[in-house]
Amino acid sequence: MIYSVIVDLSAGEVDRIFDYKGEGYKIGTRVLVSFGKRQTEGYIIDVKDKSDYDESKLKEIIRPLEDFPAISEDLLQLGGFMREEYHLRWADVLRLFIPAEMRGNRVRSLSRQQVCLATQDSLDVILDSLKPNATMQRDLVTFLYLNGATLAETVNSEFGNSALRALKQKGLVSSQDIVVRRTPYKDLNAERMPKRELLPAQQQAVDAVLADRRGKFLLHGVTGSGKTEVYLTIIDKIVAEGKSCIMLVPEISLTPNMLRQLRGRFGDNVALLHSGLSSGERYDEWLRLKNGEAQIAVGARSAVFAPLRNIGAIIIDEEHDGSYISDFNPRYNTIEVADYRAEQNGALLLLGSATPSLGSYYQAQKGKLKLLQMPERINRQPLPKVEIVDMAAETRRGNKGIFSSLLKQKLAETLRAGNQAMLFLNRRGYSSFLMCTKCGYVAKCTDCDVSLTVHRDDNMLKCHYCGKHFYMLDKCPNCKESSFRQGKIGTQQIEQLLREMFPDVKVLRMDADTTQTKESHGKILEAFRNGDAQILVGTQMIAKGHDFPKVTLVGILDGDQSLHHDDYLATERTFQLITQVAGRSGRDKDVGTVVLQTYTPSHYCLQLAARQDYVSFYKREISLREASAFPPFSEIIRILYTGEKEKDCIDQLTEQYAELADLKSRHQQAFFYLDKMRCPLKRAENKYRFQILIKLRIDSVKEIIPQIYAVCDGKTRNSVQISVERNPQNLS
């Protein structure tokens, strides 16, 4: 037979199908093949009787890498769709479908030796065969008789290796190798949870979804309206019919809470997939899904590729979140991928959010998604009261600190009442920059065009783009003076200030610095949920999806931070972020309060977010988008050029810009906008950055996009990397 193989090399020159000879292989199998003068891994994507090449010159497949097809045929079809839709290389797409450590044979199933009694005799008979003074042997026999098969390492630590060896020699104990499953978050508190009785709004949403098993829905429910219970009820019904489900959350920080609830309802029928797991855990969870041992996959963006069969539902919580769009290679839109998989499997697709993306809500208004509404909280509690504080007025009154007088007062009242508070600031570190007050020097990264952030925990300066660390300066390298001013406050400094204000109160911090270790997200959230701390400080990790009954106060310390970015998404993101973080307050019996600190208190975005009035915000923002021809009324294409040689980047961009300008002249009606420029972030990771921005009419995208890809494929300088992004989430 002739097998069509994609070699596992991410390079444009080899991004094509190669034919190999062999017998007995299945489509989707990973194989070892000879390629040039070396051996490499590859993926069988098709099988045929004849090759278009001289078959006498075709090489034989060396061997399979697993005894099962690693990639199912429906995932191969998905790969074909993604390759065409997002202009990706085959190897980059196929790598998404397997745990990364499978490549290079860096992970395999974990086996352990297990021991058990080798005889059916009674305990008394076995003990009578042993000498009375063989205490350890007798104790070990008794243990195995009462407890059954046990891992050898447990037995050795308790009774010693000599006792076990002696019993084996006597034929009283036998051993065998077993596969041990590595379970993520195995200590997560997940008691069995009974099904809850649904409220009328929840039941209406469930009934509407289950009435159309191939439908596409948008569930718009305010924070605390019980969307999660709707998801669980739908999953319960789908799984009971023998089908599988995918449940996506936008961030790893949200997986422990969702995993707890799913395990509480469905036990071991749930598997977790995300990049924060150990390689062994990720492989074992992936294998459980592939083998049908688990029917429910939960995780962040990559869980959309779970190796499930017969999918009945794909649910995407917090669908508005920008993390569902991959902004690095391979680039893809998770919701579009989920839509394709749902179509493939005849499954329903459910998007949920308290603050839907404007694009999704627009689709719902046009009838492309079925809109479901849950406008009230499940406990009939009112939404939290949001008090907007004008920080400019605070400054005029002499308060130059980060905390307003009102927030200090509310914090003290909350702590006295025995409740909890969450403080949100979407800026990690101690302060945002270090500046010399004598000469104006600002400490910057040597590889990136950004200032370094001060981190007091380890007394370092860190780059938040490339991750480089530098020693803290005691003298200015420019003027040799020791007079420094620090920039805007970060979460580290907030934590320190709170401990100074409330020395007897335990404060936890959750940001990228405190969640670097395995399972750190779950440990911090579990500690806060258990009442081990009264205040949680964090970045956007704490802004959505969490449900803490004792939280009655939320403080938003810099409501303007994302509002004034030079980006058409800035207002939408700010509204979503403020609404989401405000929704963490007052989710149980006590009424919640939110203190929103801002320098622009009259801005419509903040005023509407304070009222959680999504519909009014949508109407105003969608009108602005239509008037300015921004998505969803257009599609923005960014072509990014990066390289270590600035001139090469400029020359490559200039060549291709001329071709694109010619394309525009031939299709004037298709283009709203075309221009070239330096990126706002001019250099990152020691590479210069330039971009071409294009704005296309929606009805012209399918015709023009392939031609844009063709221009980019014709690059003439290998020193320049070119990537094409569609509706990018970050234009910096």
Image: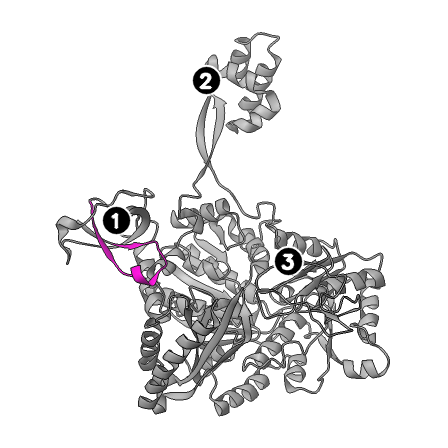
Callout 3 amino acid:
His
**Picture residue at 15% right of the left edge, 56% below the top:** 53
Nearest-to-viewer mark from 3 and 1: 3
Q: Residues within 10 Å of mark 1 (few under 14, many from 20)?
A: some
Q: CA distance from mark 3 to mark 1?
A: 48 Å
Query: Label 2, on which residue?
Result: 119
**Where in the figure is residue 191, as x and y percent of width and height?**
60, 49
In depth, the one of 616 and 382 nearer the eye is: 616
Q: Amino acid at mark 2?
A: Thr
Q: Is residue 294 visible?
A: no
Ranked by sequence position, the earlier of labels 3 and 2 is 2
**Magenta region includes residue 12:** yes
Q: Which residue is mark 3?
A: 469
| Residue situated furthest right in the rendering | 398
Quadrant of residue 621 within the rendered picture: bottom right
What span is colored magenta in the figure?
5-22
Tag on residue 26? 1
Q: Residues within 10 Å of mark 2 (few under 14, many from 20)?
A: few
Residue 709 at x, y = what percent? 34, 74
Q: Is residue 608 magenta?
A: no
Image-quadrant location for residue 500: bottom right
Q: Secondary structure at mark 1?
A: loop
Q: Earlier in the sequence, mark 2 or mark 1?
A: 1
SS at mark 3 in the image: strand
Q: Position of residue 247 (x, y in %)?
A: 48, 60
| Mark 3 vs mark 2, CA separation in Å | 62 Å
Q: Which percent across, then down, holds residue 350?
A: 46, 69
The answer to which of 630 and 272 lies nearer the viewer is 630
Label 2 vs label 1, nearer the camera: 1
Taking depth in this image into account, of 170 and 108 the one nearest to the observer is 108
